[in-house]
């Protein structure tokens, strides 16, 4: 349980934070019938995404983009509802809500701030992470294709018109760099987590195979055991 381990390691460094850790710990216990690995990654993303979107609301007000700030109120509500829906066992409904928010956020950010702000980079994360959806290959494909198409459309849209925000390239670069790092970091982390799961599963299969072979060799004669392995 990598997300749970990350939170535990962070909060155990300071005993004063253990109450906060105790609050978050139940959030990573998946409801019955929910894919545990996907649920934990999803919940970790939500717990990071919620405060960041709250922070973005204040940032957009400082940049003089009140429409984006108002939209971020809706964004915070959608991310919070994603957590609630997941806890109720309706994680796919929460995933759809957050997916819509990420797409809408990218579109509005490019419209008001321009490509240089980098919020469209999260569409790449959306496309990559769509394929970790459990047993939803069609939905994964649709989400990935839609995210890529919107990413391309936004690029040419930004080229065709000047940004409506009167700000400096330095401020936009301060947004572009952390947004790019955040988007790529999220994608790499999700892939690394699932690769670790696959490695553990493969090791478990190898251990189980070795145990079964040892058991056969101990119970049956070598000739019969070899015949059973070949069938």
Image (tube, rainbow, N blue to C red):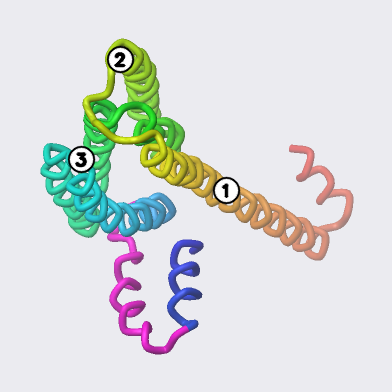
The extreme right residue here reads 223
Query: Residue 220's x, y, as percent?
Result: 80, 59
Alpha carbons under labels 3 and 1: distance apart = 25 Å
* Residue occupying image coordinates x 19% and y 55%: 80
Mark 3: secondary structure: helix
The extreme bottom residue here reads 15
Q: Residue 215: which quarter of the image? A: bottom right
**Residue 63 appears anywhere in the view:** yes
The extreme top residue here reads 160
Alpha carbons under labels 2 and 3: distance apart = 25 Å
- Name the residue beneath numbered marker 2: 157
Q: Dot 1 surroundings within 10 Å: few (below 14), some, or many (20 or more)?
A: few
Query: Residue 201's x, y, as percent?
Result: 60, 52
Task: Point out the stretch of residues depicted in magenta.
Answer: 14-34
Mark 1: secondary structure: helix
- Name the residue beneath numbered marker 3: 97
The earlier-in-sequence mark between 2 and 3 is: 3
Magenta segment main secondary structure: helix
Q: Residue 126: which quarter of the image? A: top left
* Residue occupying image coordinates x 31% and y 84%: 19
* Residue occupying image coordinates x 22% and y 50%: 79
Query: Residue 104's x, y, as percent?
Result: 22, 32
- Name the residue beneath numbered marker 1: 192
Q: Dot 3 surroundings within 10 Å: few (below 14), some, or many (20 or more)?
A: some
Mark 2: secondary structure: helix
């Amino acid at each position: 349980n990598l997300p749970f381990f990350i939170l535990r390691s962070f909060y155990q460094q300071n005993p004063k934070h253990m109450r906060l850790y105790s609050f978050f710990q139940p959030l990573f216990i998946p409801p019955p019938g929910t894919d545990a690995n996907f649920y934990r990654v999803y919940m970790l993303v939500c717990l990071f995404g919620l405060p960041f979107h709250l922070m973005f609301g204040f940032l957009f007000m400082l940049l003089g983009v009140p429409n984006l700030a108002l939209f971020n109120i809706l964004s915070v509500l959608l991310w919070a509802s994603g957590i609630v829906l997941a806890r109720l066992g309706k994680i796919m409904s929460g995933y759809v809500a957050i997916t819509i928010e990420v797409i809408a956020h990218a579109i509005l950010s490019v419209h008001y701030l321009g490509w240089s702000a980098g919020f469209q980079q999260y569409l790449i994360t959306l496309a990559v992470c769509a394929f970790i959806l459990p047993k939803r290959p069609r939905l994964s494909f649709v989400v990935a294709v839609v995210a890529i198409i919107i990413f391309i459309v936004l690029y040419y849209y930004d080229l065709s018109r000047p940004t409506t925000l009167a700000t400096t390239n330095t401020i936009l670069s301060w947004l572009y760099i952390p947004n790019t790092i955040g988007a790529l970091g999220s994608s790499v982390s999700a892939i690394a987590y699932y690769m670790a799961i696959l490695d553990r599963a493969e090791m478990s299969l190898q251990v189980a195979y070795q145990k079964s072979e040892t058991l056969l060799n101990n119970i049956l004669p070598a000739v019969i055991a070899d015949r059973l392995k070949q069938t």
